Image (spheres, rainbow, N blue to C red):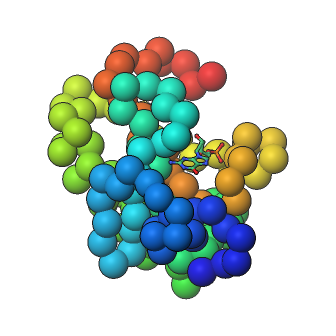
């Protein structure tokens, strides 16, 4: 856990959230500013600042995030598909420097990414 990291503090229960899933590796909660009917943030329970910091020592947490995403999507009824977004670094539009995956769905997205 990193001091002053919002996405370390939320899984630790120090800041309230609308939790949808938790296991040993992963915490997931609804985004405070949803961009779609379903917008959930899936975060590892260790501090990894961004995708660029993923390595052989922490990639198990990334795998567990994706296992969780599949479970959450099923529980949320996203049977027709969904989008997973990761913003990395300043040019990637990342605003919270703790690795997180946006699970967004409940609407049909265009085939273009941006
Ligand atoms: P990104 O731009 O990829 O770093 O996304 C950060 C997301 O985090 C953004 O969609 C808004 C969300 N967010 C920021 N602060 C909070 C918070 O305190 N609670 C919740 N639930 N979401 C937050």
Q: What residue lies at 33% left-to-right and 78% top-to-bottom?
A: 24
Image position of 49 (left or right of 101)? right
70 up-or-down from 27: above or below: above
80 up-or-down from 17: above or below: above
Which quarter of the figure has residue 97? bottom right
Image position of 65 (left or right of 70)? right
77 up-or-down from 58: above or below: above
Residue at the extreme right: 90
Considering depth in this image, is 48 or 95 the residue closer to the camera? 95
Considering depth in this image, is 19 or 25 the residue closer to the camera? 19
105 up-or-down from 67: above or below: above
Q: How far across and how far down the image is residue 96, in percent? A: 68, 54
Residue at the extreme bottom: 57
Which quarter of the figure has residue 4? bottom right
Q: How far across and how far down the image is residue 70, in percent? A: 27, 50
Q: What residue lies at 80% left-to-right and 42% top-to-bottom?
A: 91
Q: How far across and how far down the image is residue 63, in percent? A: 40, 66
Image position of 3 (left or right of 59)? right
Count of all numbered marks drawn on residues in the image: 0
Which quadrant would the C terminus be assigned to in this image? top right
Which quadrant would the N terminus be assigned to in this image? bottom right
């Amino acid at each position: 856990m990193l001091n002053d990291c919002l996405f370390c503090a939320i899984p630790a229960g120090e800041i309230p959230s609308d939790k949808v899933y938790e296991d040993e590796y992963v915490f997931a909660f609804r985004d405070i500013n949803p961009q779609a009917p379903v917008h959930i943030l899936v975060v590892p329970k260790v501090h990894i600042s961004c995708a660029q910091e993923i390595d052989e020592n922490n990639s198990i947490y990334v795998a567990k995030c994706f296992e969780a995403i599949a479970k959450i999507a099923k529980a949320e009824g996203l049977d027709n598909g969904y989008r997973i977004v990761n913003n990395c670094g300043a040019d990637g539009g990342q605003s919270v420097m703790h690795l997180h995956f946006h699970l967004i769905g409940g609407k049909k997205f265009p085939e273009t990414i941006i």
